[in-house]
Image (cartoon, grey):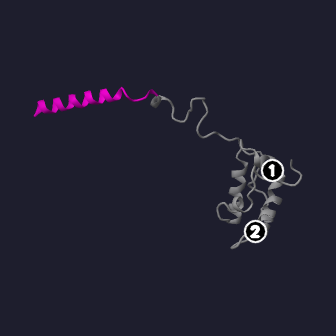
Amino acid sequence: MNLHFLSSSLFLFLLLSVFSSFISDSVFIKSETLVNGRTLLQQKKACPVNFEFMNYTIITSQCKGPKYPPKKCCAAFKEFACPYVDELNDLSNDCATTMFSYINLYGKYPPGLFANSCKRKGGLKCPGQK
């Protein structure tokens, strides 16, 4: 019995050592680092605009459920967001994410309401913008 256990252990050790030679060296590289040194989850800069204490009444007073009329909701959203269009369209910061978090917090809107109702290719378009 002892000999059987020893031979089984030796066989398992040899088997593992053979297969270990097929493991790529890349498993030892930090998984969040890509070949070019960038991280998978790019860190975004903090938003220079403080959306926490803004007045969201322009949106919450005009964009009401259950139907959430697209024209009224989009007009109210643009009135609120257009003063910050450059910051919101800058993908290197977290302004859009932060602003939408507060809009949804104060207005209790369904997820994606403004994205689906106010769709425009290339980000937010505001009057007077190039």
Amino acid identity at mark 1: Val
Q: Nearer the viewer, residue 110 or 36?
A: 36
Disc number for residue 9: none
Horizontally, residue 47 falls left or right of residue 82, namely left
Residue position for label 1: 85
Amino acid identity at mark 2: Cys
| Residue 94 painted magenta | no
Residue found 87% across the figure and 55% down from its top: 127
Q: Position of residue 72 (x, y in %)?
A: 79, 68
Horizontally, residue 13 falls left or right of residue 95, namely left
Q: Position of residue 27 (x, y in %)?
A: 45, 31
Residue sitting farthest toward the front? 121
Q: Residues within 10 Å of mark 1 (few under 14, many from 20)?
A: some
Earlier in the chain: of badge 1 and badge 2, it is 2
Q: Are marks 1 and 2 in contact (CB under 8 Å)?
A: no
- Disc 1 is placed on an element classified as helix
Horizontally, residue 39 falls left or right of residue 85, namely left
- Disc 2 is placed on an element classified as loop
Residue sitting farthest toward the bottom? 66
Residue position for label 2: 63
* Quarter location, residue 22: top left
Q: Position of residue 105 (x, y in %)?
A: 68, 61
Q: Main secondary structure of the magenta part?
A: helix
Q: Position of residue 104 (x, y in %)?
A: 68, 61
Above or below: residue 81 compared with residue 3: below
- Picture quarter with the N terminus: top left
For the record, the magenta segment spans 1-25
| Residue 24 painted magenta | yes
